[in-house]
Image: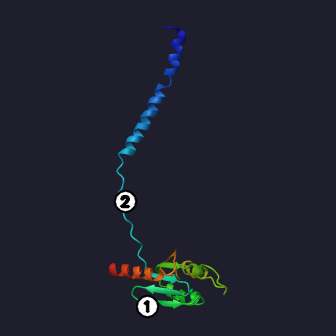
């Protein structure tokens, strides 16, 4: 064999160990990922809410608790004072707002802004002032969807045995 051919074989052979290590690493990753035992998908349940606040097209807030006879109704101007007293009990509250509740309809009151201010005042208290944890979750309310939402809330509360 000529010395020139021998040198080209030696140069080509310098990288075989690196290629072997590379393929071995890839093979290990393929085997590890292929043999992983994946968790089966689980149907998620909706979070249990203590109360529901809805704001329909009339811009009045309706506060529902499962144990109450009917809703407490608050006008847009009563939010800062009266609704604050009701929410002071804390709990997990679902707030469903229609399109009219997130815009100014000409009277200078934006219901969603007032709700946000009430939430902020109740959640940014010191430890001595706080009575109970308040968690408000906001969701859009489609036109005419208030009755469906309340029926679902009340049925879930009674199914849970509360």
Image quadrant where residue 45 sits = bottom left
Residue found 51% across the figure and 79% down from its top: 95
Task: Residue 119: give x, y in percent of width and height.
Answer: 55, 80
Residue found 50% across the figure and 17% down from its top: 9
Q: Nearer the viewer, residue 26 or 43?
A: 43
Badge 2: few (under 14), some or many (20 or more) residues near its Cα, within 10 Å? few
Which mark is drawn over residue 102? none
Above/below status of 63 relative to 94 = below
Image quadrant where residue 31 sits = top left
Q: Nearer the viewer, residue 82 or 30?
A: 30
Badge 1: few (under 14), some or many (20 or more) residues near its Cα, within 10 Å? few
What secondary structure is marked by label 2?
loop
Task: Residue 101: give x, y in percent of width and height.
Answer: 58, 81
Location of the C terminus by quadrant is bottom left
Which residue lies under the disc numbered 1? Answer: 70
Residue found 63% across the figure and 79% down from its top: 103
Task: Residue 11: give x, y in percent of width and height.
Answer: 53, 19
Task: Residue 49: give x, y in percent of width and height.
Answer: 43, 78
N-terminal label among 1 and 2: 2
Q: Nearer the viewer, residue 10 or 64?
A: 64
Above/below status of 28 relative to 142 = above
Which mark is drawn over residue 41? 2
| Residue furthest top as drawn | 1
Cβ atoms at labels 1 and 2 below 8 Å apart: no
Q: Is residue 131 visible from the viewing direction of this image? A: no
Q: Is residue 17 visible from the viewing direction of this image? A: yes
| Residue furthest front as drawn | 144
Q: CA distance from mark 1 to mark 2?
A: 38 Å
What secondary structure is marked by label 1?
loop
Above/below status of 139 relative to 35 = below
Q: How many marks do you count on the picture?
A: 2
Residue found 47% across the figure and 29% down from its top: 19
């Amino acid at each position: 064999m000529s010395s020139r051919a021998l040198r080209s074989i030696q140069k080509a052979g310098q990288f075989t160990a690196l290629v072997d290590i590379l393929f071995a690493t890839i093979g290990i990753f393929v085997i590890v990922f292929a043999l992983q035992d994946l968790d089966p998908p689980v149907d998620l349940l909706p979070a249990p809410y203590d109360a529901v606040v809805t704001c329909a097209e009339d811009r009045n807030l309706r506060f529902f608790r499962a144990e109450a006879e009917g809703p407490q109704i608050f006008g847009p101007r009563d939010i800062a004072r009266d609704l604050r007293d009701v929410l002071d009990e804390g709990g997990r509250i679902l707030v469903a707002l229609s399109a009219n509740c997130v815009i100014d309809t000409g009277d200078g009151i934006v219901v969603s802004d007032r709700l946000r201010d009430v939430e902020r005042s109740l959640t940014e208290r010191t430890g001595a002032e706080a009575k109970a944890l308040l968690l408000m979750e906001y969701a859009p309310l489609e036109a005419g969807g208030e009755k469906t939402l309340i029926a679902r809330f009340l049925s879930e509360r009674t199914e849970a045995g509360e």
